[in-house]
Amino acid sequence: MTVPDGDPRLIPRRTFTLSALAASMSPSPAARAAPPRTPDFGPCSGFIAASPDHRRVWTRGEAPVGRLFRPDSPFRVASVSKMAAASVIAPLAASLPGGLDADVSDRLGFRLRHPGWPETPIRLRHLLSHTSGLRNGPSYPVPAGRPLSAALVPGGVNYDQGGWFGPAELAPGVRFSYADVNYAVLAQWAERVTGQRFDHLMRDRLLGPAGADAGYNWSGVSQAARLRAAPGLRQQGGGWAPQVDAAPPPAPRAAILAAPETPGLTDAGIAPGENGFAFSPQGGLRLSLDDMDGLARRFLASPGPFRAMETPAWRIGPEGADNEGGVMLAYGLGVQVLLGRRGPAGDAFFGPGSADWRGHLGDAYGWMTGLFWNRRTGESLVWALNGMPESDRPPGRRTALTAPEEDLIAAGLAALGRKTGPG
């Protein structure tokens, strides 16, 4: 079954229990460095581990649509997309009057307020750090052809009786609640500020300068890259079934989830500043492992704007958080900040010294991804594994990640010459 990008039936969740993944596939011809062992990673997987003096690449697997998974195969990187968006939006916000503490309503096109706190601004910093008080509503996402305000202003067709907002007793800025809608609001704000559509803004300010043949919802991706696409897979009916990207739209078209009342809407008919969900800033970026590695090295070499983004805006406390089953214990501005806590509920994803790593995880449509760097050592590690079930996931043995994620990270760390893995 292929479902539209952003389908609400497939919002990722990490709070599941034990089951096994399917048998692993044989290595692809593109593999250049095998990990020390071959645990279950699903039908397609790979990593790129880089340090100042070497780079190791490993991939394996073939999708049932007949495409090998290679370092240059683009795929949906899920929530890594948020960090890429933040790398453009956070510096843009910091350059304007009011900076990161400006009220997003000033340039959003409508007045955004939590119904329980009508006089309290929702600030750009709140949105970037998932402390805005917003939640993904029951009718998530707002489809193209409708305005984003339809979900966030009383009376809108997607307002869901205020279901897009957290409890009335929690003011904006108080609680960390990881929610895709924050980045839809940010994307619309950026469109209003620049006059550019979000996909074009990201192409001009990040993806193009990075030399990435990549784009949000396939916007700007070449036809040659689309022919190498790796679909998101899950087991269904005894085999692997594509959930997304089995057949990307032909270039130059983008994939759009249109409202029922606008069935013929294409990306060409979408104007900037109307619906920040249109190009899926929360998870719709298609990158290859090569592109992910290029972005990791770019972020590592650009300490200026990223210093602010890497500083924790939120840390876990006794009040708890809505933090994807515990994999996020601290968060900056679009960037996960690791505290290095050990144990099955911890975030020592890279073993000793994990607190030096920054980046972001992704989880959707069967893909589990990660893009992380270590500013102290100059190392970076990017990875992807495919075929993760939506429920009954194999729990990690040493961290809050799943066991396949831990195993793939361990292989990447071994390629960097490290003797210890996660935990």
Image (cartoon, rainbow, N blue to C red):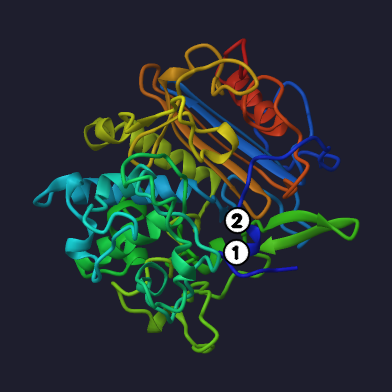
In the rendered view of the protein, which quadrant contains the C terminus?
top right
Task: State whether residue 94 appears in this view.
Answer: no
Across and down, in percent, residue 291 comes to 47, 46
Type of amino acid under label 1 = Pro
Of the pair 234 and 411, the residue shown nearer to us? 234
- The quadrant in which residue 33 appears is top right
Mark-to-mark CA distance, 1 and 2:
6 Å
Instruction: Name which residue lies at 19% across and 54% down.
Output: 103
Instruction: Name which residue lies at 77% across and 23% down.
Output: 37
Q: Are marks 1 and 2 in contact (CB under 8 Å)?
A: yes
Type of amino acid under label 2 = Ile
Of the pair 129 and 171, the residue shown nearer to us? 171
**Mark 1 neighbour class, 10 Å CA radius: few under 14, some 14 to 19, many 20 or more:** some
**Mark 2 neighbour class, 10 Å CA radius: few under 14, some 14 to 19, many 20 or more:** some
Q: Is residue 328 above or below residue 345?
A: below
Across and down, in percent, residue 164 comes to 45, 60
Secondary structure beneath disc 1?
helix
| Residue 86 badge | none
Across and down, in percent, residue 313 comes to 32, 33
Q: Is residue 271 above or below residue 36?
A: below
Instruction: Name which residue lies at 62% across and 10% down.
Output: 419
Of the pair 151 and 145, the residue shown nearer to us? 151
Of the pair 6 and 70, the residue shown nearer to us? 6
Residue under label 1:
8
Instruction: Tell me: 247 left or right of 330.
Output: right
Instruction: Tell me: 27 left or right of 244.
Output: right
Residue under label 2:
11
